[in-house]
Image: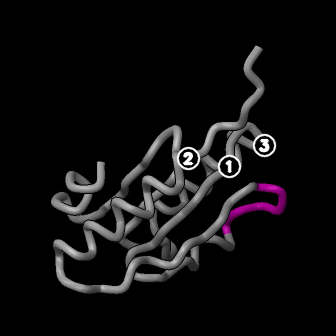
Amino acid sequence: MNTARRRFVHVFSTFGRGGPQIRAAQLMRQLGDTCEHVVMAMDGDVAARQQLPEGVDVTFCEPPPRAGFAQTARQQRAWLQQQRPDLVLTISVERGVTQLVS
């Protein structure tokens, strides 16, 4: 039986208090200790983190510095490769960036 925890990377345009962010926090809570989560808010706003109960394994990462579309996409792709995720979830992220980094 494989007991390895799954690594989910969540990329949001913002992780401020809103519907998708609250639903993501609920999902993280329901998954409990079966997963570790990494969250990146492209605007740096992580206000919805207050919705997460203690014990949820989540890391918040700073977004890459804005350096034009192509450079930002390259930095994001390199970061995602370093994360070695089992699943990448993107919410309200510019379509082009999502396509380039996947």
Res 56 label: none
Residue 17 vs residue 56, the one in the foreground: 56
Residue drawn 73% across and 37% down? 34
Badge 2 marks a residue whose secondary structure is strand
Residue drawn 29% across and 85% down? 66
Residue that badge 3 annotates = 33
Name which quarter of the figure residue 79 lies in. Answer: bottom left
Determine crowd level at label 1: few under 14, some 14-19, many 20+ residues with C-alpha closer than 10 A. some
Q: Position of residue 15 (x, y in %)?
A: 48, 71
Give the distance between the C-alpha atoms of the residues marked 2 and 1, in whole angstroms.
6 Å
Residue drawn 65% across and 65% down? 59
Residue drawn 25% across and 67% down? 73
Badge 3 marks a residue whose secondary structure is helix
Say left or right for 56 vs 20.
right
In the image, residue 7 sits, relative to residue 44, either above or below, namely above
Give the distance between the C-alpha atoms of the residues marked 2 and 3, in whole angstroms.
12 Å
Residues at circles 2 and 1 in contact by the CB criterion of under 8 Å: yes
Three-letter residue code for mark 1 = Glu
Residue that badge 1 annotates = 36
Determine crowd level at label 2: few under 14, some 14-19, many 20+ residues with C-alpha closer than 10 A. many
Q: Mark 2 or 1 closer to N-term? A: 2
